[in-house]
Amino acid sequence: RPLLGADVMSSTDCTSVTGDEAHLAGPAPVGSVRCAYQPGNKFGHAAFNTGVLYFRATLAAQAVAAAWRVMLLSVAEQDELHYVRTTEYIDDQLAFNRLIWHGFRAHPDGAVRGVGARGRVIRVLADSAESAGEQTVRGQVGEVGKRTTAPGWRSGWSHLVATARSSATRAASAPRPDWFDFAPLPARAFCSGHVYWVQQGGQRHGCVSVHTTFTEGGYAGKVYRLREAHLWLLDPPSYYESPHGFLTFTPPQLPAGVPLPPAINATASRRYDDKYSSGWLVPTALCSSPRLRAHLELARRHILALRDAIAIASMLKRTLILPQLPCLCDRSESPLVLPSCVSEGSDLALPFFCPITHIFEIYRLQQLGRRTAGAPIRESSFLRHPFAPASLRASGATVRVAIVSNASAAGMLRAAGRPVLTSAASDVQVRRALSPWASRRVLHLDSAEAIFGGWVASSAGGGGERARDDFERTMTELVYGGSWCCSSWYKPSGAFPFPQPAATEVLPDACGLDEARDEAEATCARVQERRRARQRPFTLSYVPNGGRDGYYMLSPQHPHLGS
């Protein structure tokens, strides 16, 4: 009800619910990043979003719409790919923001002024008798005390009056408003994508709407997140089916009871050293932020686990349901995400479940179902979706597959009727061990990290070199290649490529057929020990990427990397 006096309301790009509700504590001169629209704010950035808009039936609201229209029509014509035919460009959201920025701090004290006591509605000055004239779209905006009229305000009103006369509406004879009352919609209820998916882990909580802002992966990334939140209802019934069932797995976890790695290495330099002197080159950032280093190690484990889970899903012809991934560092184009690993101006609490697009490119992952060496994927909340068959959620529908380190432990569990894989299972052993449970709709791997031991030679019934080559090519094209961003505004110098797992191998003759023999036979045991050694944690080392301007890559000399 406190918002109903506003002529216009809009959602915002504020990513801090506490910052958005700062007005409850009284006026303050400095506002939170992107949330500095509170009464009393003289400094700080305010970002409004045109995803959700409300215009009340007032003359002031009509004047805002008319000015907004003029601003949008004053720019160069755009082609279908949004390339500008001249140097001038403005979109609907920037134009809307400029209307508000022009006058929300144009009061005599240079601060945002509230309407009513400690309310959310603020007054935006658009025109005055002292105005030197209407500001152009290109004009500077937001300067305290500048006596100009908001862009499009007078010309838009003139067009509105001319139109109103022909329809005999109220604007035809009314005086032009000099201001309008505006209310930023509450960030707790009208949620940004960062609040909803990053800070709340995709849980609704108090959100009545969500806008897919702060979402990577383009259209595919937005749809994936909406699916994960059960807000995308356009998939056909076939999306919820899988002829051979589904596979899920527990991703790598953070050690229980271990505190967060420190944000800052107190002995390292924090001096800006990128080309803009406003961020850090990759080696500097890595040295100065133990928390970022720990996050990159966790991402390495996630990539390895997903790689092995895809291999097993492909062998079993099952659809792979991706898990939620524990993470330690948010992504941001701004280097101010460091050293805390929390995006500037957000309320993110660490650790958190990061969106899949923080590590992988979802558009490429979605193509895995088209490859013989891949598997269709589904979002983490798939089994809970109301359109998914109820049988998938029934008691006993999911069978847990234990992962053990040796043949003796595997034998004991099998004798007790449990499905089990060793942490060095070959393609032949995976199929053999899980074939008794082929009819169960959901198999869940207790772990997928470093559990695939390699390919049995084709002469012995395995996939051999052809399967290995096809799988590695699929992983390179559709899974690997992601990076963490960014320690610098200059992205090449601030992007950290994620480590790529060592390639899977074709096993020596007679290996990968019998678990006990694999442990006893020296040749087979050496192959698995070498594989495990290359999958252990290692110290990341980034070096300049040859002639690519500013880019960094993982040192090719590291023994854990490569084929």
Image (cartoon, rainbow, N blue to C red):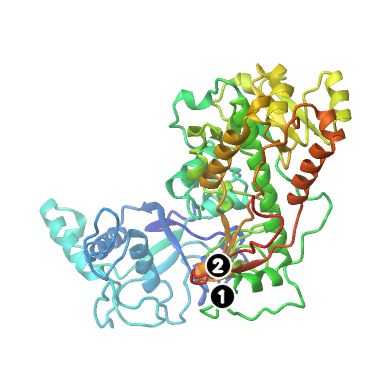
Residue name at image x 38 percent, y 58 percent:
8
Amino acid, disc 2: Asn
Relative to 348, is 243 on the left or the right? left
N-term-proximal mark, 2 vs 1: 1
**Mark identifier at residue 248:** none
Percent x, y of residue 291: 72, 63
Q: Secondary structure at mark 2?
A: loop
Calculate the distance from the C-alpha at mark 2 to the C-alpha at mark 1: 42 Å
Question: Which secondary structure lies at badge 1?
Answer: loop
Residue 30 circle label = 1
Which kind of residue does numbered mark 1 sit on? Answer: Val
The circle on residue 545 is 2
How packed mark 1 is, by other alpha carbons closer than 10 Å (few <14, some 14-19, many 20 or more), is some
Tell me the residue at 85%/29% (across/down): 516
Residue occupying image coordinates x 69% and y 19%:
435
Q: Considering only vertical position in the picture, is 324 above or below 291?
A: above
Residue 229 appears in the rendering: no
372 on left or right of 509: left
**x%, y% of residue 267?**
77, 78
User: Residue 374: which quarter of the image?
Assistant: top right
On the image, the x and y values in percent for residue 120 come to 50, 61
| Rendering quarter of residue 49 | bottom left
Please name whichever residue, 419 or 138, is drawn nearer the observer in this view of the structure: 419
- Observer-side mark, 2 or 1, equals 2
Say which residue appears at 26% left-offset and 64% top-offset: 84
Q: Depth check: 2 or 422 in front?
A: 422
Q: In this picture, is 484 found above or below 222?
A: below
The residue at the far left in this view is 166
Q: Is residue 240 visible?
A: yes
